[in-house]
Amino acid sequence: MISPFEIIETIKMINEEHLDIRTITMGINLKDCANENVDTACEKIYNKILALAGKLVETGNDIEREYGIPIINKRISVTPVSNLIYKNYTVDDCVLIAKTLDRAAESVGVNFIGGYSALVHKGYTEGDKTLIRSIPQALSQTNKVCSSVSVASTRAGINMDAVKEMGAIIKECANLTADTGGFACAKLVVFSNPVEDNPFMAGAFHGEGEGECVINVGVSGPGVVKAALEKVKGEPFGMVADTIKKTAFKITRMGQLVAQEASKRLNVPFGIVDLSLAPTPAVGDSVAYILEEMGIEKCGAHGTTAALALLNDAVKKGGVMASSYVGGLSGAFIPVSEDAGMIAAAQCGALSLEKLEAMTCVCSVGLDMIVVPGSTTAETLSAIIADEAAIGMVNSKTTAVRIIPAPGKDVGDIVEFGGLLGSGPVMPVSGYSSAEFINRGGRIPAPIQSLKN
């Protein structure tokens, strides 16, 4: 039972501290839509999404209205589309599927649809190759479609051929959407050890181990955590961790309530609650501000990584006490352009790309929504991906890169994306070349810790 005090406390969190359900994401299996004829495949894909997700937005709005809990986004994730690509498909055929996904997302009213994806951490299929080549056109010609590519895992190592290719793909995405600051890149994630039940974009896809259809919910509340820490200012770290755990417990319980209610009303199995502290550009809704509340003068100063490690661990410990099905990427996100505190830290020089990379060793994902100069070479982008993939591979954790080489922009410029994507300050990258390293190709072997059987 929820007590009157808890109800009042939750209302305060919502009204004053930016607590919300960041997303209800419906995962849909599209394997039965595969067909050698692309027009037939597209028709089946469109019809299946409308049949299963037709009432998703309406249901989310009803729950929001009845419970008074803001539900910011309603989204869909689908089977990695490369699994549906036949050998006879061309790049244009793949783009046609992307446009079908976009049309279906528009029809049901969701804000994003993820899963235009390929998992190539150990090697390519012909379908993978064709889909990856189509990504720049697909993302530049659609509004709601998000894409991801897995290039590494702890079990398989790092597919350096894929890493090299993704640097070039990102550059092409940026150039095709130069008029919007390279916006297509904001819808593309390169993964190491991706999870199958991630409700957040741009990296969500409906994994191989998932069922026919599932509801996953992503909860967020950086502002709530910061407000809780303001009450224990100056206290030892044990008290800090305990405060974050108790706050995460309360946030997760709200997410569990919404997830189960959506599952019941849509007659779709409940999957997981992802308790990720996903910030927004709104003042007060920032992971960086939480770290600064712990005593770091500016996010990026020495001690930032330790503070983030404490935060990430305490969030997970609090979440698992509130739900038996906490999953996805639960922890703390550090997307620069989507976090007011991160933006400020980057602009004043406190936060560098190298410090962000160190922080990704202990956060939920990786280098997220990083804007770099448009002149950054494809090989440098690939090298950044390789570094992040290595962190994920060696530490058996999910890492990712969502990076935007903004055409015509240089260090110090600001690129506006709008909405939850915010605005990104252009950050400097090393001027030294990694081309010879990237051009070696092949596969970096899996680490010794992968041999667990």
Image (tube, rainbow, N blue to C red):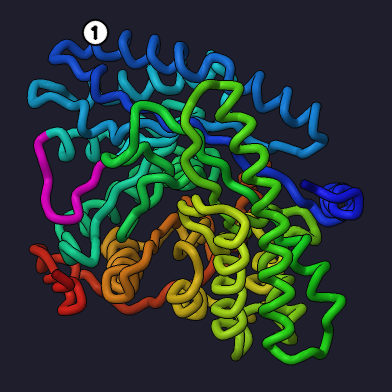
Residue 277: where, in percent of width, then height? 62, 59
Residue drawn at point x = 55 percent, y = 61 percent: 320
Q: Quadrant of residue 292?
A: bottom right
Residue 136: where, in percent of width, then height? 34, 37
Residue 162: where, in percent of width, then height? 19, 54
Which secondary structure, mark 1?
helix
Q: Is residue 126 above or below residue 345?
A: above
The residue segment tinted magenta is: 118-126
Label 1 neighbour load within 10 Å: few <14, some 14-19, many 20+? few
Residue drawn at point x = 75 percent, y = 31 percent: 64
Is residue 132 rendered to the left or right of residue 448? right
Q: Quadrant of residue 81?
A: top left
The residue closer to the viewer here, 28 or 44, is 28
Does residue 371 show up? no
Residue type, mark 1 in image: Thr
Q: Is residue 445 above or below residue 404?
A: below
Residue drawn at point x = 64 percent, y = 81 percent: 350
Q: Quadrant of residue 133?
A: top left
Q: Is residue 297 above or below residue 18?
A: below
Q: Which residue is mark 1?
A: 40
Q: Is residue 123 magenta?
A: yes
